[in-house]
Image: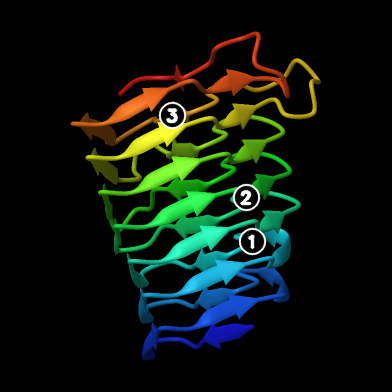
């Protein structure tokens, strides 16, 4: 729906953003070095053919989500809800991330580090009912090189009722949270991660995979 071009600063406030179709960031796409604030919005029913069904961001951008619902979006690849791709800084505060679907990893939110350093904070947010066909039904954090930097902090976050391995292929884990960190950290404070599952059913509890 919206594409914020290189180095631009944009605020979206009190809007409903839906039915977008794009390779990445079908609802809102934040290009390199942009600064984007999404406040009091609903991002819903957007579909990406690659990654970031609801919101996609690119290297060096700064992304702030506040009092926003990211719901019922999808991506054929990574990040059904929110894609944080080597972003310089991102903050998600008092948000709902729910009902999003990823064809691979990171049903709700996907974080990937970068050489410039990525600092991300999620506060007072609910991540629920998201699915990934591979890992990280609720959230996935990764770095692909020891030279990358990624720092993700969850404070007062509820991560419940998410599913990894949604397609029941037997591949994928971390229904609530999955991490694959060659460098960096994922820190959890005052947070509930419970009742998440591997597979489409509820017989196999699968809250966390990897280190936190």
Q: Would you say 105 lies left or right of 195 here?
A: right
Disc 1 element: loop
What residue would you read off at disc 3?
A: 179
For mark 1, does the 10 Å Cα neighbourhood hold few (<14), some (14 to 19), or many (20 or more) residues?
A: many
Work out how far the residue at label 1 is from the one at label 3, CA to CA, in angstroms: 20 Å
Mark 2 / mark 1, whichever is N-terminal = 1
**Horizontal side, residue 201 vs residue 52: left or right:** right
Where in the figure is residue 35, as x and y percent of width and height? Answer: 33, 80
* Residue neighbourhood size for the residue with mark 2, other residues' Cα within 10 Å, grouped as few (<14), some (14–19), many (≥20): many
Q: Which mark is residue 190?
A: none
- The residue that label 2 is drawn on is 100
Q: Position of residue 136 (x, y in %)?
A: 54, 32
Q: Which residue is mark 1?
A: 53
Say if mark 2 contacts mark 1, CB within 8 Å. yes
- The residue tagged with tag 2: helix, strand or loop? loop
Location of residue 41 by image quarter: bottom left
Q: Is residue 98 visible?
A: yes
Image quarter where the N terminus lies is bottom right
């Amino acid at each position: 729906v919206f594409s914020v071009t290189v180095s631009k600063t944009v605020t979206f406030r009190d809007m409903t953003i839906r039915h977008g179709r794009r390779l990445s960031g079908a609802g809102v796409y934040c290009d390199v070095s942009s600064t984007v604030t999404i406040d009091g919005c609903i991002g819903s029913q957007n579909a990406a053919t690659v990654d970031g069904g609801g919101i996609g961001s690119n290297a060096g951008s700064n992304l702030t989500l506040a009092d926003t619902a990211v719901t019922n979006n999808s991506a054929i690849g990574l990040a059904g809800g929110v894609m944080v791709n080597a972003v310089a800084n991102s903050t998600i505060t008092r948000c709902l991330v729910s009902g999003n679907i990823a064809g691979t990893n990171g049903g709700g939110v996907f974080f990937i580090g970068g050489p410039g350093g990525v600092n991300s904070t999620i506060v007072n947010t609910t991540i629920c009912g998201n699915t990934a066909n591979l890992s990280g039904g609720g959230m996935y954090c990764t770095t692909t090189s020891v030279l990358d930097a990624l720092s993700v902090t969850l404070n007062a976050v509820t991560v419940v009722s998410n599913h990894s391995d949604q397609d029941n292929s037997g591949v994928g884990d971390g229904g609530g949270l999955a991490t694959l960190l060659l460098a960096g950290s994922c820190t959890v404070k005052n947070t509930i991660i419970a009742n998440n599952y591997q597979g489409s059913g509820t017989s196999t509890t699968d809250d966390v995979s990897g280190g936190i």
